Amino acid sequence: MTDRLVIIPTYNEKENIENIIRAVFDLELEFNVLVVEDNSPDGTAVIVKKLMKEFGDRLFILERKGKLGLGTAYIAGFKWALEREYNYITEMDADFSHNPKDLIRLYDACANQGADAAVGSRYINGVNVVNWPMGRVLMSYFASTYVRIITRMKIMDTTAGFVCWKRKVLETIDLDRIKFVGYAFQIEMKYTTTKLGFNVVEVPIIFTDRTEGTSKMNKSIFKEAIFGVMQLRIRGLSGGIKPVKSI
């Protein structure tokens, strides 16, 4: 059994889910996959369960009662992984915006290059985004700049959702105190990780916007990210970020 797990949260991803799972399993390095499924009305879960018969103990599904948010999906996935023997746990979207081949590079950064968390970064080498309108590129880039100014993090792509975590990081973070559910979740996880003294590195990737299915971005998610950053900074300054156990 491999100690590498990829967590893929899904809501209405029937167009993508089979192809992304097969792409992960076609890699030269073995990964298991956990799909965290939020009761998609389009039948995403049915497709995953059919594939589970083919892939046996490499593919798993964690079904939830409804659309409960990206952050809570990953927290549920992290806890599931920690209950098992996984040492490298990676977040990845279902829609091919993250290239599955980059899973190997993120894993290598953690396993062989000293990183405690490896971020698939759109902005570490300029702006590497494909198929986004210029308005969204600018919004995302300047949002990350804003986050860096407020939090003092040195991470260029603070909102990135393609991240490999070492087990010890997720064991040390008090996952029950991670509050945000949208893209602010990604900022909160990185900020908490750096405040706890772990080494976070960025690995350059090319981000390609989805060609199938519907984007989950909306104004409330963006607002949470903007205002949540101030709360994070205050929590960090007041000593509110503490490990669940000693590092």
Image (tube, grey):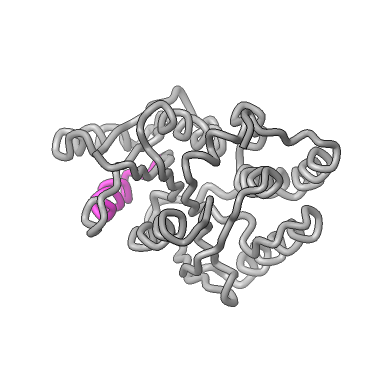
Q: Quadrant of residue 160?
A: bottom right
The answer to whether residue 183 is seen in the rendering is: no
Residue 21 percent coordinates (x, y): 28, 48
**Which quadrant holds the C terminus?**
top right
In this view, 114 is above or below 37: below
**Which quadrant holds the N terminus?**
top left
Query: What residue is rendered at 76% in x and 47% in y?
Result: 229
Q: Seen from this angle, which residue lies furthest front?
A: 246
Q: How many marks?
A: 0
Residue 168 versus residue 57: which sits nearer the camera? 168
Give yes or no for residue 203 being in the magenta stretch. no
Relative horizontal placement of residue 5, taking residue 119 as reference (left or right): left
Q: Quadrant of residue 242?
A: top right
Residue 34 versus residue 46: which sits nearer the camera? 34
Relative horizontal placement of residue 204, taking residue 83 as reference (left or right): right
Q: Which residues are magenta?
A: 12-24
Query: What residue is rendered at 43% in x and 25% in y?
Result: 64
Residue 206 percent coordinates (x, y): 46, 69
Q: Seen from this angle, which residue lies furthest bottom?
A: 126
Relative horizontal placement of residue 173, taking residue 151 as reference (left or right): left
Residue 25 percent coordinates (x, y): 23, 51
In this view, 210 is above or below 41: below
Give yes or no for residue 23 being in the magenta stretch. yes
Relative horizontal placement of residue 85, taking residue 242 as reference (left or right): left
**Majority secondary structure in the magenta region:** helix
Residue 84 percent coordinates (x, y): 36, 29
Q: Seen from this angle, which residue lies furthest left?
A: 54
